[in-house]
Image (cartoon, grey):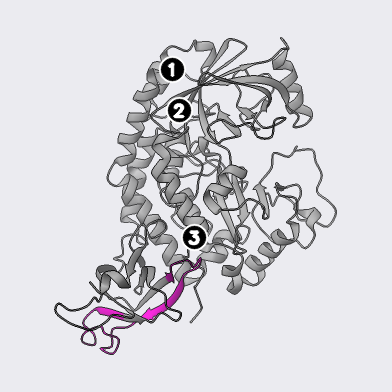
Amino acid sequence: MKKILLLVICTVVSCIPSLLAQDTENTDFYDTNEIREFKVSFEQNNWQDLLDSMRLYGDGVLIGAVEIDGKRYEDVGIRYDGRRSNAFGKGRKPLHVELDFISKNQNHEGYEVFKLSNALRDPSMVREVLSYEIARKYMPAPKANFAKVSINGQTQGLFVNVQAVDEVFLKENFGSADNSFFKCSPEYKDNESMPSGCKKNLHASLEYESKASCYTRNFRMVSREGWDDLISLTNTLNNKTEDIESILHVDRTLWMLAFNNALVNLSSYSGQNSRNFFLYRDDLGRFNPIISGLNLSFGSYKNTGSGSDLRLKQLQQLSPVLHADNPTKPLISKLLADPLYRKVYLSHLRTILYDNFENDWYEERAEALQELIRPHLVSVPDDWKEYKMEDFDKSLSSTIGRRSKIPGIVELMGKRSRFLKKHELLSVFPPKVEEVTVKGREKFSNEIIRDFKVNATVEKRAKRVILYYRYEGETAFRETFMADDGQHHDGEAGDKIFGVTIKPDNGQKRIEYFILAENIAAAAFAPVNYMYEPYSSDLEDLNK
């Protein structure tokens, strides 16, 4: 059987910091209950023209000052951000703010770079905050809340304050920031030509090219080096897929793809131009995708790369295996061609569906976020709003705009949720893992427990059950099969109780573990939140 050791592993440096970030999220700068305030000031009165010209001719910055929630910082690098959201001459534009541009140790509450999004094509104003909140349940993703912004005393309105995917983010989520790191795809100019011999219109699809020069138009290398690593990733993905787990965090990739599909987030790898994600190579040598650019989620961007923009019904009924047969999207087609990866992907899609949409949590959350920001939108002059308050009020339930036709979030996801729930690929019954136990010492017994005998009752005709475990202090999970044959401390053969014994090989006294169960049609995990909170067992507790 194909080894899947790296399929669903979390590492000490990549999972635990994310869990800690979740736990402290409501007390830090990106607390969603807080509206932050940025007061930017420039000495130049023509700052708008200067920022426009910098964006038009390059990525320079204008030096200014910024006051964040009452605390002032000097010598700050500021520029306009984005491409689609930054049309020349447009009034309200996204901002990129670097506190440490000149003073390298300058930060606000530990953060050095800030991304202030103008929520392009989002009359609801909550697409980004809501989408990132959902994403963070399953994978490392930026935090986001809202901020009032003014420049030289003139209000710019309410912005979305999105955490930058930078060194601070990488260390927080991966424990390092010095490895190969790419932005996919960069905001290149349309008139730039592709080097001779390179394929055209690949964007950041991760199709294989043998020369580094073929990647430079579609990827921006943020790290000092790494082109060879990226070429190795694309070569392995396209030509040696059986080895993909050695260079790609497959499980996180499947989570990202499931997220994009569930939320109809097509300004992403899953859409026309394979954009809005980063790739960071962790300390185990695996690239991790990091999602970004979620202002066009929930169907605000509608093109999959084939044909014209999708209509509302097509968005609601977007195939859960979009691009599964598309060779120009190898991150999807190559991974979903593997039967187990396909089941895991569908399991993740099912989890996102039932955690957030089938129970209407997303609607309640969107309404709460809108109520939070409503007073701050009402007070903003109409000249500094993309949409009128009338559009904001209807943005959850109705399509806004005659030309762009931005779906209402609930209008889209209510019917999409029902479509996915009934879809033949998602309506099948996955295995059900119950009563996970580790055998402890019997009452009044003198026996000393020296190993971990793990049992799990698994319903729904499981054909394969795998235990992933690691000892305290280890980074990667090991794997071993659990059996229902009556010979692995599992009761009677065929009684749906699977068992396995983990024998510490070097005096280890504690394990963390989770279970993957597979039947002929689907797969399931226990615990469901295995990415952040695996089961654990300690020999000291078992011997009490």
Foreground of the two, 224 or 522: 224
Q: Secondary structure at mark 2?
A: loop
Q: Which residue corresponds to mark 1?
A: 377
- Residue 116's quadrant in the figure? top right
The reply to whether callout 2 and callout 1 are in contact (CB within 8 Å) is yes
- Residue 51's quadrant in the figure? top right
x 67%, y 59%: residue: 207
Q: Which residue corresponds to mark 3?
A: 12
Q: Residue furthest bottom?
A: 487
- Looking at marks 2 and 1 on the same chain, the residue that comes earlier in the sequence is marked by 2
Q: Which residue corresponds to mark 2?
A: 125
Horizontal side of residue 215 vs 128, given as left or right: right
Can residue 151 be spotted in the picture?
yes
Amino acid under disc 3: Val
How crowded pointer 3 is (Cα within 10 Å; few <14, some 14-19, many 20+) is rated as: some
* CA separation in Å, label 2 and label 1: 10 Å
* CA separation in Å, label 3 and label 1: 42 Å
> Magenta part of the protein: which range?
470-499
Position in image of residue 389 (x %, y %): 41, 17
* CA separation in Å, label 3 and label 2: 35 Å
Indicate which label's residue lies in the foreground, 3 or 2.
3
How crowded pointer 2 is (Cα within 10 Å; few <14, some 14-19, many 20+) is rated as: many
Can residue 397 be spotted in the picture?
no
Q: Relative to 510, is 282 above or below? A: above
Residue 480: in magenta span: yes
How crowded pointer 1 is (Cα within 10 Å; few <14, some 14-19, many 20+) is rated as: many
